[in-house]
Image: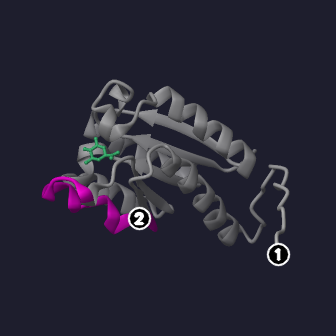
Amino acid sequence: MPPTVLVLNGPNLNLLGSREPEIYGHETLSDIAALCERAAATLGLAVDFRQSNSEAELVGWVQEARTTRAGIILNAGAFTHTSVALLDALTASALPVIEVHLSNIFRREEFRRHSYVSLAARGVICGLGSQGYELALAAMARLLAKTSGKKPANKKTPAKVKRTR
Ligand code: DHK
């Protein structure tokens, strides 16, 4: 069984595709879930992809992940900027956490520049749209390989590099 990474999405991310596409893009959350499945398969990981509008539910899922998942990738939506409860759950999980945001939170309103989640995160990726999830999975694969001592899988055929002088 490949290590399973919990990919958690917070409030309003169920509206992706129709919610402020100029900020969050045109892809739906199902598109991003499919992208994560594909990326995970090439990295030798499995994903458990979830979304909730409820802080309590997200906290519950992080608590469950403590003993059942290898790591957490989290776009906590607006809870990023408000939730000490989510931060505490992530810290208690002792799992590697990577924080993702579709938008560049530093180019937006002042209140989005502070993240409680970041205090528990090994790394943060923002502003790259859905590609941020793919990058987070690649980074997670390397983190997990480091702790297990195994090489990260890369099942993609390496691209041919054309050399020019
Ligand atoms: C998503 C949200 O819903 C916002 O509340 C955050 C984040 C930013 C994102 O860019 O993915 O501020």
Seen in the picture, residue 13 relative to 128 is either above or below; the reply is: above
Q: What stretch is highlighted in magenta?
A: 107-123
Q: Nearer the viewer, residue 56 or 81?
A: 81
Number of residues whose C-alpha sits closer than 10 Å to that of mark 2, classed few (under 14), some (14–19) or many (20 or more): many
The crowding category of the residue bearing disc 1, from other C-alpha atoms within 10 Å (few below 14, some 14 to 19, many at least 20), is few
Ligand 1 - quadrant of the structure image: top left
Residue 52 position in % (x across, y down):
35, 32
**Label 1–label 2 contact, CB within 8 A:** no
Please name the amino acid that badge 1 sits on: Arg
Residue sticking out furthest to the bottom = 165
Q: Which mark is residue 165?
A: 1
Image quarter (top left, top right, bottom left or bottom right) of the N terminus: top right
**Horizontal relation, residue 88 to residue 143: left or right:** left
Q: Residue at x 80, y 49 (%)?
A: 156
How far apart in space, not on screen, are marks 1 and 2 (Cα)?
42 Å
> Can you identify the residue that label 2 sits on?
121
Report if residue 108 lies within the magenta region: yes
Residue 88 x %, y %: 30, 59
Q: Is mark 2 on a helix, strand or loop?
A: loop
Q: Which of 77 and 22 is in front in this view?
A: 22
Question: Which numbered disc, 1 or 2, marks the residue that appears first in the sequence?
Answer: 2
| Numbered disc 1: secondary structure | loop
